[in-house]
Image (cartoon, helix red, strand yellow):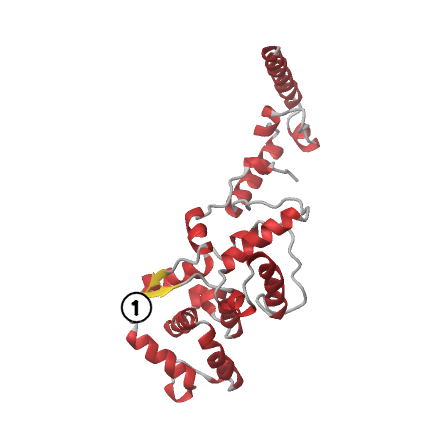
Amino acid sequence: MAQVPARYIKDKAIDYDGEIFACMSLPVRVAGIQLRPPSIGVFALLETIESPVVANFAKATAFDYYRALYILKHGREAACEVRDWLAAGGRKKVKPEDETTWLPWDKRVASFAEFNPTDLFEFAALHRLLMDNSFGGFEMIPQIDPGCSPYIFGAESIANTCRLAASATNYTYDEILWDLPLCLVGHIAAVAARGAGVKGVGRPKDKADIKKQLKAAAKRERTGKLHPWQKAEPHCYPLSKEQIEANPAIEKQFNAAMKAYLAKLRKKKGRRK
């Protein structure tokens, strides 16, 4: 199977400015409400209610959107409301279209929605606030132990975040849960991983371009053509058996590329003298 050197694949598009502002905990206005970048406590609450705004945005309803907006706005103040909603069977019992099934928290969310009317553009803005910059630091770490919890933001993740962030920021447990942007936590984790000697810590590659480049490389293999990296650095990337079988004449092309590379190397060494 053809392999593509990492430098021939585009990096994932990163909103560097957005990450900076998120790490600074600067608020973003959504539906006329000032919302700070989400913390791990916010994500933990959203996960307990199985919010599709995070898990499957395309299927999120207006009620889902307002629940997420409410949690982002109220943070720690919403925690007990969410706990009581879950304890009363909210996930299975409540049907947004049937007000007779609503629990106290649903009624508060509905009232909140009346005072904060919005549209689909604000839905998208909320999703971006939650997802665009929150995980950039974590994505830089090549291997993260998923643990054994069914939750991504369960007790294990909360404990790990507190252990990591407390020493780095001197924040209290409560501040880490509700005030510290998860975006900053991720970058602290990436710095800690690099300091611990973890290999490959860095920005991820663009997934779409990975597929594109692998497909193009496989086609070159099947048709007996040289890869761009074989032309540029033939000493590092020898011909594959598939390339030779598809086009025996490729060996001459490869040898010519090697000669050109060596000539370029000698010329470069001569200049240094």
- Residue sticking out furthest to the bottom: 100
Query: Residue 97 at what x, y percent from top left?
Result: 37, 81
Q: Residue furthest front?
A: 170
- Above or below 204: residue 104: below
User: Can you give x and y, in whole percent of width and height, for residue 12 in the image?
Assistant: 50, 45
Q: Is residue 49 left or right of residue 158?
A: left
**Residue nearest the observer in this picture, 200 or 75:** 75
The residue positioned 30% from the left and 72% from the top of the image is: 116
Viewed as shown, does residue 207 lie left or right of 53? right
**How many labels sit on residues?**
1
Residue 104 vertical placement versus 168 (above, below): below
Residue drawn at x 59%, y 49% as measured from the top left: 191
SS for dot 1 = loop
Q: x, y percentage for residue 15?
A: 43, 48
Relative to 12, residue 225 above or below = above
Question: Residue drawn at (51%, 60%), measured in percent from left and top?
Answer: 182
Report whether residue 227 is seen: no
Quadrant for the C terminus, please.
Answer: top right
Query: Residue 163 or 235: which is nearer the viewer?
Result: 163
Q: Residues within 10 Å of mark 1 (few under 14, many from 20)?
A: some
Q: Quadrant of residue 170?
A: bottom right
Position in image of residue 210 (x %, y %): 55, 43
Residue beneath disc 1? 118
Q: Quadrant of residue 161?
A: bottom right
Between residue 176 and residue 239, name the one nearer to us: 176
Q: Nearer the viewer, residue 43 or 184?
A: 184
Is residue 184 at all visible to an observer of this figure?
A: yes
What amino acid is found at the position of numbered circle 1 in the picture? Thr
Indicate the quadrant containing the N terminus: top left, top right, bottom left or bottom right.
top right
